[in-house]
Amino acid sequence: MFEKVTVYCPIPHEFRRYLREICGDNIVPLVCRALEELILGDEGMKDVTTIGDFDKYARQFRNADTSFEETSREELLATPDSDIRVLRHCKAGVEDTWDFGVVSDPSSREEDGHNGYHVSVGVLIMVQTFALPILDLATNGRVTPQRLWRLAMHQGWSEVPSKRGDYGFAGIDYGEIHHERKKNPSPVPWMIPAQVVALEELGDLDVIKEAIVCQGGLWVWMGPDRFPLDGTPGDGLILPALSESPLPKDNISTVEKLPFELLCAIVAEGSLSSFLSLASTSRTMHALLLGSESDRNAVAFAWIFKNAPWYIPIDSSDEENPRFEMRKVSGMWAYLRRCRSSASMRNRERIWRAAEQIEEFAKKCGV
């Protein structure tokens, strides 16, 4: 029953078990506090969106205690978009219901006793709410929630038992999370519990958090929308140091005579390491590309737009139509450095690349 549902994030109900394992018999107050703040302190982790034909769902579960009414794949694929609802801000991980693959209605309260919606079986699917703006922007709006649902139905996700044989879409590279795409993932996938417990010896809460996130791999569960708009520049990029003055104009090479705008366009075609190597080739090139804050900001602006659109902040006040908001950034070079050091942005890139693959997979399937 549960093979259809895998939530690749630390839903509190699931990971409280992990906390009990780590903190139960071990006197590790700093590690326990770090895990609680990293996992349980993020309400966005359990915010999910339920997508599907709710009328067909109601018919399926009308007599769920005695029978389950299946719907053919052909009928599901013929469902008009107007019948495919997108119910945002449902809640996953609620005690006593998540074990049955049920998410709560966003308008219901726990005391109401609403059973919510079964997403582990049938014609509804569940997506992390914070992933939908990424899906929209990464595909320029071509993969809507309705198209994503059709792709899931095309792959047999409504069938009991599901015949797809894997978690997620077959053939999609989900990045570093690949080995944790299972029913009960570990919140710290790259460390065994004993290694997590041993972090108490570091003696500093922030250092322990960083170790859990980076070395332990918890970044793969972090919300991918924590844009580092403020703070120190970060250490994701180290500028090459050249203290000598640029050469006189008469002695510069042909490439160094190119207009700055053209140099920015050339830099944007390569990797950041290639850019830094180019800036290190001569004193003049270093001065051209990195000599002033405005030059560095212009280079960073061009590189982000060409190579890392996932770093661009977004305005998602209109949840159905998110849009880029680069004007939120002041100091583009410092922002790029912070992004390179951000666990949240690392996860955002992973999800963005998976979204691009999902679009290609949908085309291949004719959906």
Image (spheres, rainbow, N blue to C red):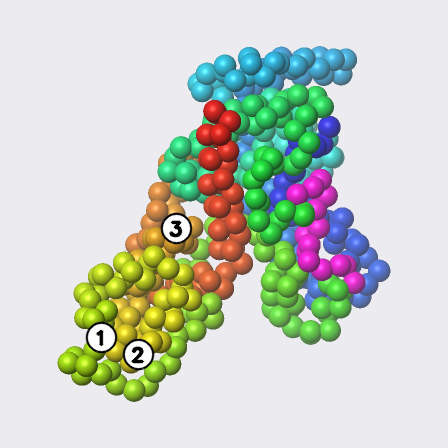
User: Are circles 1 and 2 on residues that touch, CB within 8 Å?
Assistant: yes
Q: Is residue 204 above or below residue 157?
A: below
The numbered mark at residue 282 is: 2
Amino acid bearing label 3: Pro
Task: Name the residue located 21 percent from the left edge and 78 percent from the top edge.
Answer: 252
The disc, 1 or 2, on the residue closer to the chain's N-terminal end is 1
Q: Quadrant of residue 158?
A: top right
Q: Residue under circle 3? A: 309
Task: Name the residue located 57 percent from the left edge and 45 percent from the top edge.
Answer: 174
Place of residue 72 in the rendered image (x, y in percent of width and height, measured from the top left): 61, 13
What separation in Å lies between label 3 and label 1 (alpha carbons)? 32 Å
The disc, 3 or 1, on the residue closer to the chain's N-terminal end is 1
Instruction: Kindly report which numbered mark, 3 or 1, lies closer to the viewer in this rendering.
Output: 1
Task: Name the residue located 51 percent from the left edge and 55 percent from the top edge.
Answer: 346
Place of residue 79 in the rendered image (x, y in percent of width and height, measured from the top left): 50, 16
Residue 323 within the segment the image draws in magenta: no
Q: Quadrant of residue 163?
A: top right
The disc, 3 or 2, on the residue closer to the chain's N-terminal end is 2
Magenta residues, start to end:
181-194
Task: Rate crowding at label 3 as few (under 14), some (14 to 19) or many (20 or more) other CA atoms within 10 Å.
Answer: some
Amino acid bearing label 2: Ser
Residue 188 within the segment the image draws in magenta: yes
Amino acid bearing label 1: Ser
Q: Quadrant of the N terminus?
A: top right
Q: Is residue 77 above or below residue 25?
A: above
Secondary element at tag 2: loop
Q: Is residue 12 above or below residue 239?
A: above
The answer to whether 125 appears left or right of 278 in the picture is right
The answer to whether 21 appears left or right of 301 in the picture is right
* Magenta-drawn stretch, dominant element (helix, strand or loop): loop
Secondary element at tag 1: loop
The numbered mark at residue 253 is: 1
